[in-house]
Image (cartoon, coloured by chain):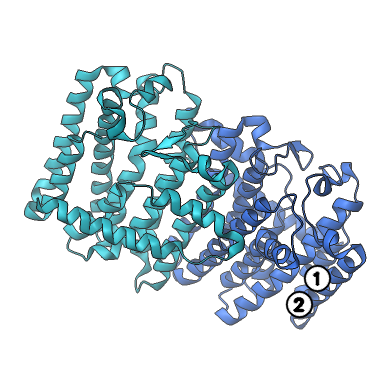
Chain colours: A blue, B cyan
């Protein structure tokens, strides 16, 4: 299947770049670099960076143009997982089939490794944007990512999630959590990728909008898998959301309605991609695969 | 004393801007905004932002040009304190005479508030840089701040500090910790301020170098105060470094040698400022006051 080759190609680009970006350390601060690398190379699917590269290429530019912003997104996603897994947050000991960061390095280093990944994301983007002939697209990509990651984006979503753990949340709160905790960073991946193809703000906002639809579909599928999946395929215990008393889409709306909503959103994404014809094949296939995944 | 009026003027500018930058929230993510504001307005001396504004003004520009970068520095400094105070790090319950962030809001929200402040620092700088006619100086100021804050700067210093707690460290390790944990952000404050006055890289690096001297002098004075000061003036228990088994400059070199080194560094800073004549009065006075402070 050709799209899988493309996926591997993008993933290799991202992994190579991440290795380079982590950079040099001295013996005295080595531990925080080790901890950052541990979580960065713990088997993440690289979905967010791949979305950025794919959108950039679909819009006619070299995917490597988006690499610094794509890698920054992956670092931000990874830091959010490291902090989210801490005892004071979700208190998870396993992630992607491996012990979580603080289990290996201790809580103090895990906090610093998360901080380090977040800061490094900006170091990379700023360095690259400084070298651009026209920095305005780099700054716009950075703004998309920064806004999506902050207290009115991902961190806001995590706050609402943390404060509502074990509570019955209403539809509005659940929508806020999904929109911000998962949706914002996926939407930023598509938007930043489009800016690296130098589109105007209207077109970039179109990609952002469809990114939110994709993010919600992905979240619903994640929640469905948590109910139906099996532990070894997922790398975390099935049913953990229920045990952690996380409010999920299927818990609020039921399994059937959740599946319908997911299909609806997937169709919306694919309708958006259709006018791009063959160039959108990869994203169409990837979206289908994500919605049919077993883990 | 005229320099104190100037100090108040700068502090008011910073406080007003910080209030504005914190921005809008919804009820669902309100708690993380409250936690961020709590630590941001817990009585910090605003030294780093004041240094940025003062250098920018000394070099002939309006100090307000440096405001976004100055406020970003204060947010980064504040986030580092919030995370540093956590039980997994220094486990401090009091700071500046008030309960620390996690004592009031809980560890989970304190972690998110720290993350939120760090991310907000970049949101502010990116937003402002996007609006500049010539974004390259904004990007350079951002790069100075990002590099100083990361794993080869402040976070590296915190890592070395955390891993060496309770150990007898050698001179090299102590120098690394001081250079990075305190020095880097003060050096970045001066450097970023100079970039906002549109100086070239050589001149900016001169300000950075003198910032490191100032940072080390400030750190030594801090450590001396911890030994000699009294609890109510400092807002944290005197002697807490010794009880926490923190390695300090006086512990390694003795009180007398520490005072001498501090005086030497202060002279170095004032020699650097001298050629600027009257325009440097404020920074000369502020430096003297810092080295003679009682808390």
Give the CA distance from mark 2 to mark 1. 7 Å
| Relative image position of residue A48 (x, y in whole percent) | 68, 59
Dot 1: few (<14), some (14–19), or many (≥20) neighbours within 10 Å? many
Is residue B253 depicted above or below A131 in this figure?
above
Question: Dividing the picture into quarters, in which one does residue B256 lie?
Answer: top left
Closer to us: B154 or B79: B79
Whether the residues at callouts 2 and 1 have beta carbons within 8 Å, the answer is yes
**Residue A156 appearing in the image:** yes
Residue at horizontal 30 percent and vertical 32 percent from the top? B232
Sequence-wise first label, 2 or 1:
2
Q: Which residue is mark 2?
A: A273
Closer to us: B32 or A215: B32
| Relative image position of residue B34 (x, y in whole percent) | 50, 55
The reply, left or right, for residue B115 in relation to residue B181 is right
Is residue A278 depicted above or below B99 in this figure?
below
- The disc placed on residue B62 is none
| Relative image position of residue A269 (x, y in whole percent) | 77, 74
Dot 2: few (<14), some (14–19), or many (≥20) neighbours within 10 Å? some
Closer to us: B184 or A157: A157
Q: Which residue is mark 1?
A: A284
Q: If the image is split into quadrants, where does the N terminus of chain A sit? A: bottom right
Subunit under mark 2: A
Label 1: state its secondary structure.
Answer: helix
Question: Dividing the picture into quarters, in which one does residue B57 lie?
Answer: bottom left
Label 2: state its secondary structure.
Answer: helix
Closer to us: B238 or B75: B238
């Amino acid at each position: 299947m050709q799209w899988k080759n493309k996926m591997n190609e993008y993933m290799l680009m991202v992994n190579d770049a991440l290795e380079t970006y982590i950079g040099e350390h001295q013996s005295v601060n080595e531990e925080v670099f080790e901890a950052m690398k541990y979580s960065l190379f713990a088997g993440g699917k690289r979905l967010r960076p791949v979305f950025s590269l794919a959108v950039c290429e679909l819009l006619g530019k070299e995917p490597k143009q988006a690499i610094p912003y794509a890698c920054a997104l992956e670092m931000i996603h990874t830091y959010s997982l490291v902090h989210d897994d801490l005892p004071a947050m979700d208190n998870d000991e396993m992630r992607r089939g491996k012990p979580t960061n603080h289990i290996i390095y201790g809580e103090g280093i895990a906090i610093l490794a998360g901080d380090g990944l977040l800061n490094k994301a900006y170091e990379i983007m700023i360095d690259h944007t400084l070298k651009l002939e026209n920095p305005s697209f780099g700054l716009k990509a950075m703004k998309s990512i920064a806004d999506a990651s902050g207290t009115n984006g991902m961190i806001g979503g995590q706050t609402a999630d943390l404060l509502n753990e074990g509570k019955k949340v209403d539809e509005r709160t659940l929508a806020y959590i999904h929109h911000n905790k998962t949706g914002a960073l996926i939407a930023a991946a598509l938007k930043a990728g489009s800016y690296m193809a130098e589109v105007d703000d209207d077109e970039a906002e179109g990609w952002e909008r469809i990114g939110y639809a994709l993010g919600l579909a992905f979240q619903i599928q994640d929640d469905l898998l948590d109910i139906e999946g099996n532990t070894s395929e997922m790398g975390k215990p099935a049913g953990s959301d229920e045990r952690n008393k996380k409010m999920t889409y299927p818990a609020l709306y039921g399994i059937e309605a959740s599946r319908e909503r997911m299909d609806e959103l997937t169709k919306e994404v694919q309708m958006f991609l259709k006018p791009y014809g063959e160039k959108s094949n990869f994203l169409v296939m990837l979206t289908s695969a994500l919605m049919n995944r077993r883990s």
